Image: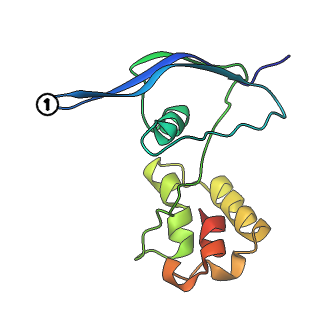
Amino acid sequence: MTKLLSVKNLKKIYYSENSEIEAIKDLTFDISPSEFISIVGPSGCGKSTLLNILTDMDSSTCGKIIHHIPNLKFGYMLQSDSMLPWKNIYDNVTLGLELQKKKTKENLDYVDHLLNLYGLEDFKTKYPEELSGGMRERVG
């Protein structure tokens, strides 16, 4: 069966001045197309750490992540949104493009397309506090 992603012997250790915490220990799994994956466990077991590593927001201490499909990208929605309350919805949505210096016409057109697709086109100039929880999730 074709694989999208393989994780082999992944390990993540957080170091502090007096200790170390092993957040992930020897994790190995594969993800195949059309497969539904759930990450469950108690608080502090490494779920968010794993997602941060898969989305390149953090790095592993050791192990391998193999992308079997070129340019395969992962993302996830945080439990609470990370919108900046002083920026309107459009500015929040385009912040990543701005930080990466990728705020091109093509990318902004795609942002407009997505806002339309998710029924948010009329809320571009609103601020996060003016949206319902569901709308905030769609913005996220």
Residue under the point 62% across and 39% down? 39
**Residue where numbered disc 1 is placed:** 17
Taking the spot 38% from the left edge, 20% from the top edge, the residue there is 61
- Kindly identify the residue that appears in the image at 46 percent across and 62 percent down: 82
> What colour scheme does the image use?
rainbow
Nearest the viewer among 5 and 49 is 49
Kind of residue sitting beneath label 1? Glu
x, y percent for residue 17: 13, 30
Left or right of 17: which side holds 138? Answer: right
Percent of width and height locating residue 120: 70, 75
Q: In the image, residue 54 lies at what x, y percent?
A: 55, 33
Residue lying furthest front: 42
Q: Secondary structure at mark 1?
A: loop
Above or below 105: residue 20:
above
Outermost residue, left side = 18
Residue 22 sits in quarter = top left
Residue 79 against residue 76 in the figure, above or below? below
Of residue 118 and residue 104, the one placed in the foreground of this image is 118
Residue 25: x and y in percent read 45, 21
User: Which residue: 75% across, 63% down?
Assistant: 113
Question: Quadrant location of residue 66?
Answer: top right
Q: Is residue 82 left or right of residue 15?
A: right
Quadrant containing the N terminus in the rendered view? top right
Q: Quadrant of the C terminus?
A: bottom right
Report crowding for label 1: few under 14, some 14 to 19, many 20 or more residues within 10 A (C-alpha). Answer: few
Q: How many marks?
A: 1
